[in-house]
Image: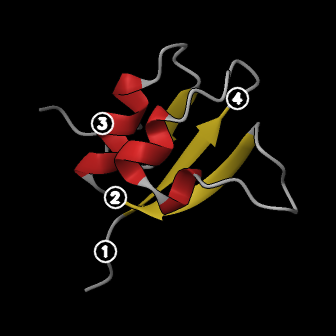
Amino acid sequence: MTPARWTVRIDARCMKAGLCLGIAGEPFRPNAEQGLRPRTVVVDAGVDVVDAAETCPVQAISILGSPAGGPPDD
């Protein structure tokens, strides 16, 4: 079975604090094509992505794609 996928959006409010990178790693790593932020990535669903979004000090991370349109409830 294919794992669930979420679309993660990092918007212009991003202040590059790096908490998301420390928590969830690769989905939040900057790259040469898209620069640092804003950007949209598709990731495997997981608690670490939710934790990264909830930890963002400026709430710049949105998660789409779960059955409710966002991360699952705790």
How crowded pointer 4 is (Cα within 10 Å; few <14, some 14-19, many 20+) is rated as some
Determine the residue positioned at 54% across, 31% down: 61
- The C terminus lies in which quarter of the figure? top left
- The amino acid at mark 3 is Asp
- What's the distance in space between the residues labelled 2 and 1, CA to CA? 7 Å
User: Mark 2 touching mark 1, by CB under 8 A?
Assistant: yes
- What's the distance in space between the residues labelled 4 and 3, CA to CA? 17 Å
Between disc 3 and disc 2, the foreground one is 3
Between disc 4 and disc 1, the foreground one is 4
Q: Which mark is residue 3?
A: 1
How crowded pointer 1 is (Cα within 10 Å; few <14, some 14-19, many 20+) is rated as few
**Residue 16 x, y percent position in the rendering:** 65, 29
Q: Disc 4 marks which residue? A: 11
Dot 3 falls on a residue whose secondary structure is helix
**Residue 45 x, y percent position in the rendering:** 34, 58
- The amino acid at mark 4 is Asp
- The amino acid at mark 2 is Ala
Residue 64: tell me if it is visible: no
Q: Disc 3 marks which residue? A: 51
Along the line of sight, which residue is nearer the eye, 12 or 69? Answer: 12
**Among numbered discs 4 and 2, the one appearing first in the sequence:** 4
Q: Disc 2 marks which residue? A: 45
